Image (cartoon, helix red, strand yellow):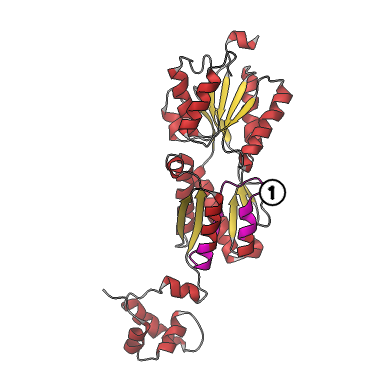
Amino acid sequence: MARPTIAEIAKRAGVSPGAVSFALNGRPGVSEATRARILKVAEDLNWHPHSAARALGGARAGAVGLVVARPARTIGVEPFFGQLTAGLQAGLSVRSVALQQMTVEDTPAEIGVYRRWVSERRVDGFVLVDLQVRDPRVAVLEELGVPSVVLGGPGRHGGLPSVWADDREAMLSLVDYLAALGHRRIAHLAGLPQFQHTQRRMRALKDSAKRHGLVGVESVPTDFSDAQGAAATRTLLSRPERPTALIYDSDVMAVAGLGVAAEMGVPVPRELSVVSFDDSVLTRIVHPSITALSRDTFALGEQVARALLAAIDDPESARNVRTATPRLTVRESTAPPPLDEER
């Protein structure tokens, strides 16, 4: 069925096309009785505004953008992003706002999408994830003048508001727990080193090592994938003096590492403790179940959606929102180290 036109609405309502335009766009120039009649005709014809024309007229696009610069295969298997985007969509749908998402290969491509979507008026705002050290995207979004909310912080995101949890505090709680069990050789299988949250976790581990007198503590960067997580685990467990505890920056890597330990005959948790920085169904269904930092990622997505909608409604009122620090959930994958390590 052909899309009804303003001319058809005008003819059926017995008014001029100009009067129809005024009525449909909420502008003065027609009486309330005439406006009501025009809107009734438009509803009967199942008329909806053309999105491009509406954008050119200054109306909202009814969508927000999320652009992620990571390998699509990696994103596709990460429960964190699945729960985050589900929460975002749930929070946005309350206002009938859509989530427009794209995965790209690198930051320049991501910036190109920002510029294109803004020029085409496809979105009313953006969610910025994976905040980088000296992040070039922040200045671009400020230049474009589009409401945006950063997932991550605190600080170093220009004038953009953020929704964040304390990665440092979370890492300190993990290391404190492992040190209390008696572990002294702890390795951290980290994410991409250009991410601010990766840097905060790595620094927190170093600070904890000094405070607890740990030895042989290190962070090994990865791309968050199961393949790199498994490869790094295999290298660490092949050393003559291997770590007695491994902290993984993602649940996918933690599960992969658990598989490598089994393959190499390193029993978990008797000889090796395994901890994940993310919690999900993956960490709960494997054996042994994995000790992890838990938070409601779906609710986090809803919070980000609310913050972005507020920024779109009133950019001057946008503010930073600190969420609860992920809490430690102890499961079967952690225990004191072997007796010889304790000595």
Could you say which quadrant of the image residue 206 lies in? top right
Asked whether, in this view, residue 315 is left or right of residue 8, the answer is right
- Residue 208 visible: yes
Task: Tell me the residue that label 1 is attached to.
Answer: 155
Is 129 contained in the magenta span?
A: yes
Q: Position of residue 127 (x, y in %)?
A: 55, 54
Residue placed most toward the observer, 98 or 133: 133
* Point 48% across, 25% down: residue: 257
Q: Position of residue 280 (x, y in %)?
A: 47, 36
Q: Residues within 10 Å of mark 1 (few under 14, many from 20)?
A: few
Could you say which quadrant of the image residue 111 lies in? bottom right
The vertical placement of 210 against 128, above or below, is above
* Point 35% across, 88% down: residue: 13
Please name the amino acid that badge 1 sits on: Gly
Is 82 contained in the magenta span?
A: no
Q: Position of residue 232 (x, y in %)?
A: 53, 26
Tell me the magenta residue range.
116-141
Residue placed most toward the observer, 108 or 89: 108
- Location of the N terminus by quadrant is bottom left
- Location of the C terminus by quadrant is top right
Q: Secondary structure at mark 1?
A: loop
The vertical placement of 104 against 12, above or below, is above
The vertical placement of 113 against 260, above or below, is below
The vertical placement of 8 against 132, above or below, is below
Residue placed most toward the observer, 178 or 122: 122
Asked whether, in this view, residue 144 is left or right of residue 37, the answer is right
Asked whether, in this view, residue 23 is left or right of residue 135, the answer is left
